[in-house]
Image (tube, helix red, strand yellow):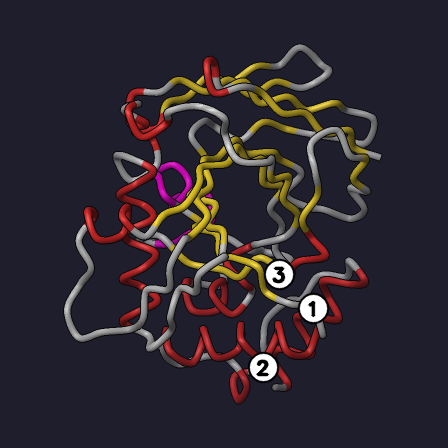
Amino acid sequence: MKAAKLIWESWESGHKIGTLPYNISPKSRKEAYEIQENLAFYSNISVIGWKIAATSLEGQKHIGVSGPLAGRILKDKVFQPNDDIYLGKNKMAVAEPEFAFKMGKTLRSKNINYSLEEVMQAVDTLHLSIELPDSRFEEFSLVGELNLIADNACAHQFVIAQPVDNEWRMIDLSKHKVVISNSNEIQHEGVGSNVLGDPRVALTWLVNELSQNNISLDKGMIVSTGTCAKPIPIKVGDTVRADYGQLGSISVILK
């Protein structure tokens, strides 16, 4: 609980942490996810979903990890397209275009892995998403996987749109292009395959990661699956736009 309290206080104040004291730092992934759970409890904010960090080799290198990490999405950190978002002391200062899935049924922890087909059958809707990640650690690329999981996998703010009004299940999301841009005319183009090869594969990874740590993915939860493009730099005053072609586009204004 002490680690969660320290991380939450940093999250709210914007003052970064050097390191977690050894006696309260996680020693396993299970302990790291338990700190996340305590973080959600300590914040007194409901969890409405999950995010996946480091779904590409570039992303893994950026935060100094060997593979993906899961984090909880807190209700008060989720915004609608075209909302004004207070950027505050966000040190990462990037925006990431992502595909998000809302679950139509609960997938409980079990002894064997879920298949992609099982997971997709449990999905209700597809959503367009922009993540504005941040870490509570001063040197987030040096603290290691377990501390970053405890840090909620760098989860911070999200823009999540209403369900896509399109026959999206007929689209190969791995080949679907996404473009994110900012007011400074910087533009990054990406594709769904940048997310563990396919956003649906990433969702399946998340389900099994939770299952292995005795965590269920509940009905109604939304999962933002990781950035499809190189994260774009952002600053106060920017309008950030993510264009998903035939699936639509979303924007957010940073204050």
- Dot 3 lies on which element? loop
User: In screen coordinates, is 59 left or right of 22?
Assistant: left
Dividing the image into 4 quarters, which one contains the N terminus?
bottom right
The amino acid type, in three-letter code, at marker 2 is Pro
Residue 62 magenta: yes
Estimate how packed mark 1 is, as few (under 14), some (14 to 19) or many (20 or more) residues with alpha carbons within 10 Å.
Answer: some
Residue 110 magenta: no
Q: Looking at the picture, tell me which residue is in the foreground, 91 or 204.
A: 204
Dividing the image into 4 quarters, which one contains the C terminus?
top right
Q: Which residue lies furthest to the bottom in this view?
A: 23
Q: What kind of secondary structure does the magenta stretch mostly adopt?
A: helix
Q: In this view, does 222 lie above or below 10?
A: above
- Dot 2 lies on which element? loop
- Chain part drawn in magenta: 55-65
User: In screen coordinates, is 22 left or right of 115?
Assistant: right
Image position, residue 45 (x, y; %): 69, 68
| Comparing labels 3 and 1, the label whose residue is closer to the camera | 1
Indicate which disc residue 137 carries: 3
The residue drawn where x is 47% and y is 20% is: 247
Q: Which of marks 3 and 2 is nearer the N terminus?
A: 2
The residue drawn where x is 53% and y is 35% is: 163
- Please name the residue that numbered disc 2 is placed on: 21
- Please name the residue that numbered disc 1 is placed on: 45
Q: In which quarter of the image is residue 251?
A: top right
Q: Quadrant of residue 232?
A: top right
